[in-house]
Image (cartoon, rainbow, N blue to C red):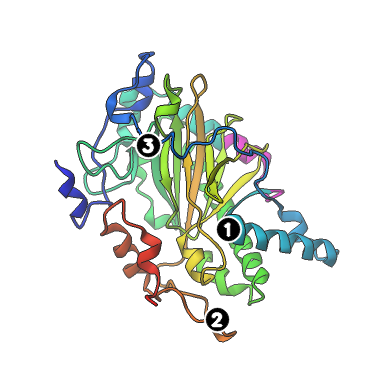
Amino acid sequence: MDGAAADDDRSLQWSLQVPSVQELAKRRLEIVPERYIRNDIAAINDPSGPSTAVPLIDMSKLQNNNDSQQQDLELQKLYSACKDWGLFQLINHGVTKELVKNMRKQVKEFFELPLEEKKRSAQKPGSLEGYGQAFVASEDQKLDWNDMIFLQTLPAQRRNLSLWPQQVPSFRETLVNYSENLREVAVCLMKFMAKALEIEEEEFSQDFEEGNYDVRMNYYPPCPEPERVLGIIPHADMSGITLLLECGDTPGLQVLKDDRWIIVEPVSDAIVVNLGHIMEVKSNGIYKAPQHRAVVNRLKERQSVVTFCYPNPSANIGPAEQLIKLGSPPLYKNLTNAQYFHLFYNRKLEDSFIDMLKLKA
């Protein structure tokens, strides 16, 4: 299949099957296969860049109605993080340490399964859901140095349980519980994000209470030439917000800030919150959906659990009405949910999605 496949209506809603990177790494290669080599990384890579500047937000301070001064200060920090970074680390988020530990355990046990067992959850033609890689649209496309399993989790009727691993005993129960807890975190955050803009809390949150939630579990094997590959290419998310849980202390996530790639150092039990295009649109451009990427390590593997949070499919995606009423001219189109996703999937992978959403001057 040639590059023309990227113009197909289904191009970004399905992915070609490619070899497991985890199995490739087991061969202890000294040289990475050509299809994974990217010659443009050095121009934008800055390994000496700052690593501790990513904002840290304390959910318990946002929720502390007994100390309005502390709450206001944390709300201002949240506003600045969303406006200037589009990404922050969230602590005291309410998800128990036991559940975090169990979710990490399920991910670890899945990727430790033999390849043939993992393939029982393999992606089916016409769908991104399952075990494999995402957005591989042609046979000559460069590949990311990762394997993943992508599952729709909420609401329950969206689940394709035939793809949920049965060989890991507590996988299903833990993932459902984890997804429901992450939905509570997302809805709570949405209220504070709206409050920081001085609009009604429900302006953002109500659409996510019955929204769609998807989970992607990533495995990044060690790589003999980490400076020549990427775990995930630079991109911004199409979600409302994305919630990332690191499964260890190996850094890999980087965010683009002021034209520099900044390492997001793992913080114990923190959740990395990354704003997506939907939140950039809803905030009318005040909040930003940042470019981010994943790099890999020469000696250590990395695993992560990524939850994509989307509004209810019946909700329109456009600038918040209250912001427009306050006098801000709309900068983005007002689309139905179906129009938004159609626009995303029916484009070339290299085309800027956020530019497609903007109103022309």
Residue 59 versus residue 284 in the image, above or below: above
| Mark 3 residue element | loop
* Contact? badges 2 and 3 (CB < 8 Å): no
Q: CA distance from mark 1 to mark 3?
A: 35 Å
Highlighted range, magenta: 91-102
Q: Is residue 210 visible?
A: no
Of the numbered discs 1 and 2, the one sitting upstream in the chain is 1
Amino acid at dot 3: Asp
Q: Is residue 265 visible?
A: yes
Q: Disc 2 marks which residue? A: 328
Amino acid at dot 2: Ser
Q: Is residue 228 magenta?
A: no
Q: Is residue 98 magenta?
A: yes
Q: Which quadrant of the figure contains the C terminus?
A: bottom left
> Which is more toward the observer, 34 or 149?
34
On the image, the x and y values in percent for residue 261 come to: 53, 42
Number of other residues with Cα within 10 Å of mark 2, as a class: few under 14, some 14 to 19, many 20 or more: few
Q: Disc 3 marks which residue? A: 40
Q: Disc 1 marks which residue? A: 186
- Mark 2 or mark 3: which is in front? 3
Q: CA distance from mark 2 to mark 3?
A: 39 Å
- Mark 1 or mark 2: which is in front? 2
On the image, the x and y values in percent for residue 359 come to: 39, 75
* Contact? badges 1 and 3 (CB < 8 Å): no
- Mark 1 or mark 3: which is in front? 3
Of the numbered discs 1 and 3, the one sitting upstream in the chain is 3
